[in-house]
Each structure stands twice: as C-alpha cells, then as structure tokens.
Image: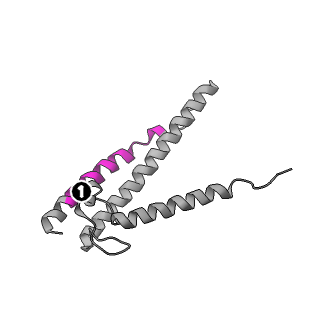
Amino acid sequence: MTRVETNKFKQILETKQAELAHVLRNREAIAIEKSADALDEVQHAAERELAIRNLDRESNLLRQVRNALHRIDEGSYGICLHCEEEINLKRLNAVPWASYCISCQELADRRRHSEEYQEGFEEVPIGNAA
C-alpha cells in the first residue's frame, strides 16, 4: 500500500473516530425514567435496551477504528491479523477498520455463528422434565 493510500485511510479513520466519540458522549437515552404507568415503564425499558445495544455496537466500532489507527502507526495496516496477507483495497475502502482479509473474516464469522448456535442448544433442556 502506498503512503498516499495509507494517509487517505488514516484521515477517514480519524474522522470516523471523532464521529463515534461524539455519539458515545450522548448517554441520556440510557437514563432510567420512572413512570406511574406500567406501559410507559415497558416502553422506557425497551428504548433503554435499544440505546444500550447501540452504544455497545458504537463502542466496539470505535475500538476497531482505534486499533486500525494503531496499526497505521505501527506500519502493519492493511495486513490480515490471521493469515498476514494483504487485505484487498476494495475491502479497506468498504471497511477501513477491517483487521482481517475477506476469507479470514468469513471464517471468523462462521466460527462465531457456530459457537452462538451451540450456546443456544445448551440452554434448551433435553428430554422430559417432570
């Protein structure tokens, strides 16, 4: 990857980092609000749960962006953390914080999906519970 390309990605990542940091500062949506109406309580709880999920997702994305900026500083940006091959520029243009090439990312996603699938079965009782 050329220095010009690396600088372009660094600028994109720094902009995304600032945007995410700003979004994560707004945490009013997770405040617990009390209401005399039970339906309002349920509605507030659902909104709070959605806000917490969004904050969690944005926080994880911010961590990935910061890791990508760290890899730029180290000189290892654009190299897959698993197979150590170059990450395709098309992938980096789509997902500048990508730490894996598309093949390794698909493998990691399948593995994670399989583990989540298995965990779901562990919670289901087998046989007749009397």
Whole-percent x, y for residue 20 in the image: 33, 49
Q: Which of the 4 quarters of the picture holds residue 96?
A: bottom left
Choose between 66 and 8: the one closer to the eye.
8
Residue projecting furthest to the bottom: 84
The magenta stretch spans residue 92: no
Whole-percent x, y for residue 14 in the image: 25, 56
The magenta stretch spans residue 19: yes
Q: Residue at x 38, y 59 (%)?
A: 63
Choose between 66 and 101: the one closer to the eye.
101
Residue projecting furthest to the left: 4
Q: Which residue is mark 1?
A: 93
Q: How many numbered discs sit on the rendered protein?
A: 1
Q: Residue at x 33, y 46 (%)?
A: 22
For the N terminus, give its image quadrant. bottom left
Magenta stretch in the rendered image: 9-29
Whole-percent x, y for residue 106 in the image: 41, 62
Q: Is residue 35 visible?
A: no
Q: Is residue 11 left or right of residue 95?
A: left
Q: Secondary structure at mark 1?
A: helix
Q: For the residue marked with disc 1, what is the amino acid? A: Asn
Residue projecting furthest to the right: 130
Q: Is residue 125 visible?
A: yes
Q: Residue at x 51, y 35 (%)?
A: 47
Q: Residue at x 38, y 54 (%)?
A: 61
